[in-house]
Image (cartoon, rainbow, N blue to C red):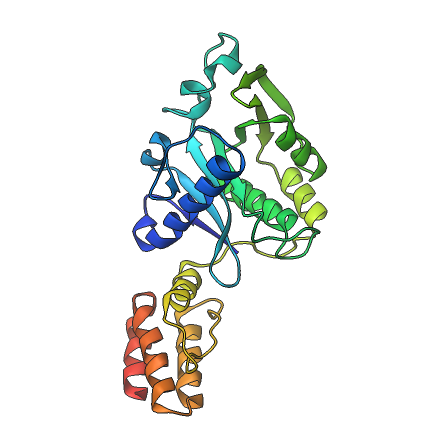
Amino acid sequence: MIITIDSLNRHKFGSVLDDMYRLRARVFQGRLGWDVNVQDGMERDEFDDLDPTHVVSLDDDGNVVGCMRLLQTTGPHMLADVFYSILDGEPPLRSSRLWEATRFCVDTARLSGGKSRNSISYVTSEVMIGAFEYAQKAGVLDAVAVIDPVMNRVLKRSGNAPYDYVGSAKPMGKVTAMAALMDCSDERIASIREFSDIRGNVFSSEEEVIALIAEKSRPKSDNCIPFRPAKGSSGELQDYFVQQLRDANSPEEIVAVRQLIEAVSGTLSDKSRQALRRFN
């Protein structure tokens, strides 16, 4: 499932962002050996302070398993300010309809091979679909990404081949870097979906993710009631909680349900909260 986190909703998803930064540290410093800034086990840079949009993939247990950062090119961005040698002296690309995609990674330790839902291939495609569909709705026409030859081959194999490149490939530390251009078109999105066999909506609502994270953070015990966030509206969450209260077989289970209701109460409508109070 995909959640997009930006300046408008980041206050709701601090724990998700922290897990995302930890994943980035494990991948970019730990696995790839990049010279990146890691503090307290989290990788962040100055571009994370510019209110980018983070496209984050979560598994069914609320773990961050993939991510990508989208940043406007009208201001500072990595191709203009870090990887500018790729441009061979040409001015950086700047347009409100061109975004930069960086810091893409997936959790290869947690994910499997193949094309199943919990596979590296699936999450890679899910993040790409989420990024392109989100950008498309924002009126963005193209994305530029600094990649290496390995990622270039991954993109080509997954129905997401760049349509062009900017400048020329340059050695950057242990890898070779190049700047690839990809259009945010229906055809590209359809091609990725065809490759990955992802047919439905990849986005989760904020309410679903908040409920999932609340369940993940709740202390586990023998009396915990398995929970998967209800799809859709506040009313459906209300129905779910009412059913859990009806099915509770002990005072401990009732307390567990009430704790979960309290944890996600901010996502419920006033009407739903009042109904649950009456039920209690």
Give the residue at the far bottom of this rendering. 249
Occupied quadrant, residue 239: bottom left
Residue 52 visible from this viewpoint = yes
Percent of width and height locating residue 264: 34, 68
Occupied quadrant, residue 214: bottom left
The answer to whether 269 is drawn above or below residue 167 in the figure is below
Percent of width and height locating residue 232: 47, 66
Residue 139 visible from this viewpoint = no
The answer to whether 5 is drawn above or below residue 172 in the figure is below
Q: In the figure, is residue 87 to the left or right of 15? A: right
Q: Residue at x 45, y 89 (%)?
A: 247
Taking depth in this image into account, of 6 and 78 the one nearest to the observer is 78
Q: Residue at x 40, y 69 (%)?
A: 215
Q: In the figure, is residue 145 to the left or right of 258? A: right
Taking depth in this image into account, of 85 and 243 the one nearest to the observer is 85
Give the residue at the far top of this rendering. 89
Percent of width and height locating residue 81: 40, 19
Q: Residue at x 46, y 15 (%)?
A: 84
Percent of width and height locating residue 198: 65, 53
Q: Quadrant of the image for the C terminus? A: bottom left
Q: Residue at x 38, y 42 (%)?
A: 42
Taking depth in this image into account, of 266 and 125 the one nearest to the observer is 125
All told, the count of numbered labels is 0
